[in-house]
Amino acid sequence: MPKHPGLYEPRSLRPTIADLYDNPPLNETLTISGWIRTRRSTKAVSFAEITDGSTLRSLQVVLPHDKISRERIEAELHTGASLTITGQLVPTPDRPQPFELQAQAYTLLGSADPETYPLQKKAHSLEFLREIAHLRVRTRTYQAVFRIRHGVSLAIHQFFHERGFVYVHTPILTPSDCEGAGQLFQVITTEDPDPTAFFGRPAYLTVSGQLDAEILTMGLGRVYTFGPTFRAEPSHTPRHLAEFWMIEPEMAFFDLEDTMNLAEDLLKSLIRYVLRHYADELAFLTERYDPDLLARLESVKESVFLRLSYAEAIDILQKSGREFAYAPVWGTDLQAEHERYLVETYAQRPVIVYNYPRDIKAFYMRQNDDGKTVAAFDVLFPGIGEVIGGSQREERLDRLEAEMQRRHMNLTAYQAYLDTRRFGTVPHSGFGLGLERFLLFVTGLTNVRDVIPFFRAAGQMA
Ligand code: 4AD
Ligand code: MG
């Protein structure tokens, strides 16, 4: 960062610990606020490690007992307590940290009783931390994860913006089940439990912004959504949330291959971004949770994803000689064990499976000429399985209507959507990236509950 002379002057932005590491104002007197990570006392001085969320690194503060009494320090400065300290930043070339703050005075902002504050140990289990989701953000693990989540979000916007996409906000309250899977949360008012009382028709929380994104594509060309989606899936797995965030690009004039290329570019570009900007966080997560994390990110960033048709994938699984719990048969959905075999054993890199059987996929996917498959694709990642699901869309009105009728859908509820095919229809495609699934891959964590600040999953609301 360039030198910022106004940084430590009155009325400028308060300096953070990250600012000190970027551009240390050595030997100057400054004021820093934060929380105590650890504190220990010797006869003449006490040492406190302070964090403020701006970086994973902490600031070492030295509190000399001739300026601040040891009794006061020991009574007030416990792990988790918050304070503001004024002191001089002095270089410490012979210590692990480059400098420390020699305190002249401090003000206690908030105490944390060591008898009741739960975060006393250096490393708690993620299971324990899930029970106290309101406090877990005070640990380095979640600071690293949420900082990476922020960076990935920013990089997603940048990626699409650079390619001329328009970020569109699609509704959260919706009248229809986009995926047709019937896993919806219904919305009623507290005044009247009749589900049609407010809107005159039933309303649900959206499972996907896709149908609205398709409508907007027809005027804007390339759009994407990035928002919360809701599924009443009673799945108690480490990969399913009832509320999760999805990124859904939709592109006019893109066919299946264009779309698979875009998906692959997006994923690699996000991995490169995280590697470039979150080295401290990745080093911490690698050391604490997943020794292979850095190597895996480096290898996927360089890899060419293997593309297999669904039929080829089934063939490979059948010839694998593996005993699967579910036999791989044409016409059935790939199970997690099948996806893992394809990615981790067969390809040893991400795999894109395309051209799935029509009957296991959604109504809007474009029918292939074989009459049996649709132009759908899933991107499968090591350790995670499906991170992206997408397809070319059925743009031919007669085909689409026939398919909806075949599935006994209520066509009158979809007239706005069908108008896109009635007036100036074009080939178009899109996909959905599950943000939390992708974050598992880049953080090395294994449960989606650990990569969203407040998780909602069947039976659980943090
Ligand atoms: O494959 P899905 O269901 O696709 C759609 O919703 C399409 N409408 C997307 C599109 O084409 N615009 O979901 C997309 C992705 C999955 O690949 C997965 O990463 C994630 O969303 N996902 C979930 N993540 C967490 N918890 C759940 N319950 C999820 N369900 C799907
Ligand atoms: Mg899917």
Image (cartoon, rainbow, N blue to C red):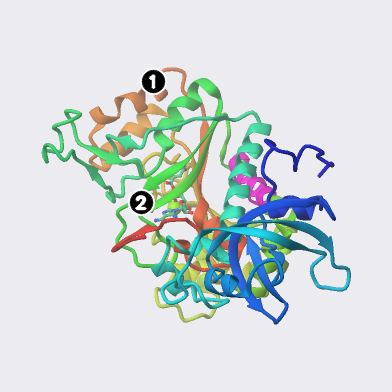
Q: Would you place residue 318 above or below residue 143 in this image? A: below
Within the magenta stretch, is there residue 234? no
Q: Quadrant of the N terminus?
A: top right
Residue 400 seen from this side: yes
Q: Which residues are magenta?
A: 258-270
Query: What residue is drawn where x is 29% and y is 51%?
Result: 183
Q: Which residue is mark 2?
A: 359
Instruction: Indicate the amino acid at tag 1.
Output: Arg
Q: Nearer the viewer, residue 160 or 419?
A: 160
Task: Decide if residue 206 is on the left or right side of residue 451.
Answer: left
Residue 272 seen from this side: no
CA distance for labels 2 and 1: 25 Å
Q: Would you place residue 230 above or below residue 105 in this image? A: above
Tell me the chief SS of the magenta region: helix
Circle 1 SS class:
helix
Query: What residue is drawn where x is 82% and y is 38%?
Result: 5
Query: What residue is drawn where x is 49% and y is 69%?
Result: 338
Q: Give residue 422's mark.
A: 1
Query: What residue is drawn where x is 46% and y is 68%?
Result: 336
Q: Nearer the viewer, residue 335 or 183?
A: 183
